[in-house]
Image (cartoon, rainbow, N blue to C red):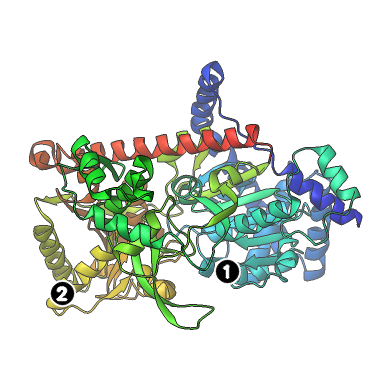
Amino acid sequence: MSQTAVNEFWQIFNARKVKAPDLRGPDALISSFVGYYKNRKPVLPRLWKQAERIEALEPEIHNLSSSHFQEHVKLHRDLARLGRLKGPALDRGVALVREGVLRAIEKRPFLCQIVGALAMSEGYICEMATGEGKTITAAITASLWGWAGKPTHIITVNDYLVQRDAEEMGPIYKLVGLRVGFIIHETEHEQRPDHYRREIVYCTQKELVADFLRDQIALGTLRNSAQTSVGMLRGNFGRQLQVPGLFRCIVDEADSVLIDEAVTPLIISNSPDDEPNSERYRKANEFSQKLENKKDFTIDWTVRSIDLTPRGENRLEELAGEEGFWRGKRRREELVTQALTAHNCFLKDEQYLVVEEENEKTKKMEQKVVIVDEFTGRIMADRSWRHGLHQAIEVKENVKVTADKENLARLSFQRFFRQYPFLCGMTGTAWEARTELWQIYRRAIVRVPTNEPCIRIHLPTVMFDNEDQKWTAVANRIKELHERGTPVLAGTRSVWASEELSHRLTALNLPHRVLNANQTKQEADIIAQAGQLGQITVATNMAGRGTDIKLARGVVDVGGLFVLATEPHGSGRVDRQLFGRAARQGDPGSAQMYCCAADDLFIRHAKHLRHSWRLMGPKRLIKYAQGKAEQLARFNRKQVMRADDWMDESLPF
């Protein structure tokens, strides 16, 4: 085995060590004080002065010939590999990369982008408003880190952005002496090791964690240095591993990746062809249809769960009769509870879709249940609910029942990202999550001001008693804006909501485009066109993240883009991210929230207060409900973190 391969095995072994243990008692109290100080430490003035020093070097760097420019790049790359890229050398290195951006793609980074890059290079989560050039900011930081010679991973939210950013930023990296690679779902298995060994690697968290887990399966049960050494001496590692260690990571849309989606486990599993228990799932579905809500079972909308009442347990025992399998109280109640959950708590076109896909083995089209990510509005390919819930939904929708999967390896994104020795990120909405980002990842926030003042107009929240009133008002408001020529981006929380609004706009003869989980392939094009005069775009709340909405000629004269949210999200950060689509880079724009007492947020988290909205006021009710929702989400994430820590410390494999 070569020395390079040995080093890579050691690096992967070391990456198993979790860097941020769950602190308790006095340690947790001290850590919270440190986090509070770090998040309010006045680092911005220092970074701004450093950026001004870097800008002062611009005339000298700009006048360098191509050959002299490359000589300077080589010198600073060597300093980075020796760990000496500090002080004046760092300032000059950033100035070189900035000039590289200008020469490669003819865009001159602003001071705010330099400040953001410096903040990330120090390990901060950088809050930058939509449209402020986070892609180039990340490229500057990645170049400084890439000079050190070890791979820097840049995580973004989907395959389209991975490939786009790698290709658009590629000329910059080439000019400063770095190789760039990218991993998308279609990247062949044989090609991945080469891409992962380049200095800059763009990928989604799903692809990276999946490849990392496959490497862990290949490494087997190694838990300490002795086992690793013995395995190497025996030559147990016959193939090249995919990911050569975890070193430095830049996370785009950090709040979404590190907070909202962080507790979702990625699981490598085997899936048998047939489900031997399919008839039992169908029988459980039959039993569930004979039970009555509020008499035989109750629904907890807060966590979307079902509890059987004593009457329901007795009724179920009568229905089960003397049949062998169903005589077991625990298993019959578990299966029937999942069937009730599927019917009452999970709705088609909200939590999941039924789509047609080709069976790889039979080459025939089959209907399939796919999960929709409630944070992003996108399909979560190859994901399934656990403990029989997915099968219960398949029976409900009368599609082929898939087999329970045999888990081979499991890792939450939260646990994975805590393994990086150097982690930073950027997003438009980080401040609200500052406490969690510190507690889980030990990352503080730096809020970078915009290059141009933001002149977005926030109009008063409008609320109604029921959905029909709300959708009628939303459609009429869009019609009014369309007649003015104002482009409108209407944000919805679910596929069903986007389709409902589409039907109402069609009834009013208003041309529009819809972006939801059914149109992900057209996402970039639909969002890019959303700034045209009179354009109406209906999109799930988070769709279009990473794609700028540029205003067409004449749009500024009619007030810029109008963002209309049709329902509050469980997190205020998501609403703020949607509103951030308007008034980017100093352009004019407006934002407004429409909601009603029947919205999911109020049903789940303000059930007894939602009809008192006139007394409380819509904004106060939304703040209360979102506070309860975020409190529950934080609790769930903390439980996952504790489970991750327990698994890492206690299990011998």
Crowd rating for badge 2 (residues with CA inside 10 Å; few <14, some 14–19, many 20+): few
**What residue occupies the far front of the structure in this picture?**
322
- Quadrant containing the N terminus is bottom right
Please report whichever mark, 1 or 2, sits nearer to the chain's N-terminal start: 1
The residue depicted at 62 percent of the width and 62 percent of the height is: 202
Q: What residue type is labelled 2?
A: Glu
- In the rendered image, which quarter is residue 531 located in? bottom left
In the displayed structure image, the side of residue 304 where residue 80 appears, left or right: right
Q: Where is residue 377 in the image (x, y as percent from the top left)?
A: 37, 61
Query: Judging from the image, what secondary structure is the residue with disc 1 in?
Result: loop
**What residue occupies the far top of the structure in this picture?**
26
In the displayed structure image, the side of residue 587 where residue 218 appears, left or right: right
Depth check: give the residue in front, 505 or 584.
Answer: 505
Depth check: give the residue in front, 230 or 265.
Answer: 230
For residue 185, which numbered disc appears in the image? 1
The residue depicted at 18 percent of the width and 43 percent of the height is: 296
In the displayed structure image, the side of residue 338 where residue 222 appears, left or right: right
- Quadrant containing the C terminus is top right
Task: Please state which of the two labelled residues, at mark 1 or mark 2, is closer to the viewer.
Answer: 1
Q: Is residue 62 above or below residue 417?
A: below
**What residue occupies the far bottom of the structure in this picture?**
363
Q: Position of residue 332 (x, y in %)?
A: 34, 46
How far apart marks 1 and 2 lie (CA) works out to: 42 Å
Q: Is residue 208 above or below residue 324?
A: below
The residue depicted at 29 percent of the width and 36 percent of the height is: 628
Q: Position of residue 206 (x, y in %)?
A: 56, 58
Query: Judging from the image, what secondary structure is the residue with disc 2 in?
Result: helix
The residue depicted at 11 percent of the width and 62 percent of the height is: 473
Q: Which amino acid does label 1 sit on?
A: His
For residue 483, which numbered disc appears in the image? 2
Q: Where is residue 71 in the image (x, y as percent from the top left)?
A: 83, 62
Crowd rating for badge 1 (residues with CA inside 10 Å; few <14, some 14–19, many 20+): few
